[in-house]
Amino acid sequence: MLDYDDEAATYDATRGGEERAGAAAAAVERLLPPAAALVVDVACGTGIVTARLRRPGRTVLGVDRSGGMAAVAAGRLPGRVVLGDAGRLPLAGGRADAVVLVWLLHLLPDAGPVLAEAARVLRPGGVVITTVDKNAAAFGTDSDVARLTAPLREAHGRTPADGHRTVLEAGARHGLRPTAETGFDGAGQGRSPADWRRAVEAGRIPWATAAGPDGSARLCRDLAALPDQDRPRPQPRYRLLALHRG
């Protein structure tokens, strides 16, 4: 896993920057109740998305457990960023109108505790807005890389904590029901075959690593044989789900 303290200074520039943040914030806004007065962005990172959610009459609070990330976010939201863990939010129960979880659940072994905590701090009628199926987003649009990698992804991919069905089932246990969904493009996040090969060689792709040394080496050879080695393939299309507390 990344060391987010070390990554904080360059994180935005390597993750699609302002364009991707704007797309993410616009998608979140589509799912937020118009009258939401307190929005809590959990794992807010650098605050690049969080700051875009501010509106007259709405308070936006950013929470992150990385001191480095929180320090950057505080520059965008002075006095509105706190250190805290997603499993133990520094907020009294029943206070928030919305809890936002963007690109968080896929990092966890189990989404249940975080969804339980989100439900705890929500008022009745509040909403959790979360990304689902984050790692599958890179392969949602057909491409030669998507087709080439499909057998290994299907054979060695693990059920992610942010899988759509997994999130629905975990949410239901805590009184959260799905009511809406939208999506947004990950600007600047399309990877070329050369990018994928380097990531596999560096051991950053779990389903490739799980294929063993021979499987990973074969995949790298096949990726190297694809045309247009440095041309990015389609951008990921991220899914965003709204779960309301009854």
Image: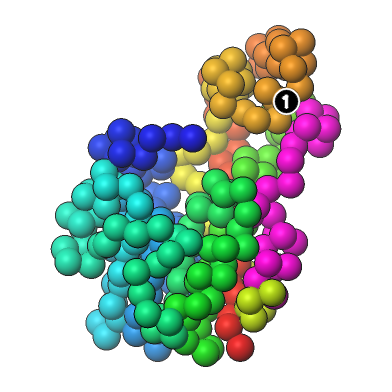
Q: Give the range drawn in magenta.
A: 151-172
Q: Eyeballing the image, is 77 above or below 46?
A: below
Res 104 seen here: yes
Residue visible at 68% across and 23% down? 209
Q: Eyeballing the image, is 40 above or below 227?
A: below
Q: How crowded is mark 1: few (under 14 residues within 10 Å), some or many (20 or more)?
A: some
Magenta stretch, overall SS: helix
- In the rendered image, residue 198, in percent from the top left (x then y), is placed at 55, 17
Q: Which colour scheme is used?
A: rainbow
Magenta run includes residue 130: no
In-image side of 23 versus 199 (left or right): left
Amino acid type at image mark 1: Ala
Who is closer to the viewer here, 198 or 234? Answer: 198
Who is closer to the viewer here, 149 or 121? Answer: 121
Q: Mark 1 points at which residue?
A: 210
- In the rendered image, residue 141, in percent from the top left (x then y), is placed at 69, 43
- In the rendered image, residue 246, in percent from the top left (x then y), is placed at 61, 88
Q: Tell me which corner region of the image, top left, top right, bottom left or bottom right, holds residue 60.
A: bottom left
Residue visible at 71% across and 16% down? 216
- In the rendered image, residue 162, in percent from the top left (x then y), is placed at 63, 54
In-image side of 25 versus 223 (left or right): left
Who is closer to the viewer here, 163 or 66? Answer: 66
Q: Tell me which corner region of the image, top left, top right, bottom left or bottom right, holds residue 215.
A: top right
In-image side of 162 versus 124 (left or right): right
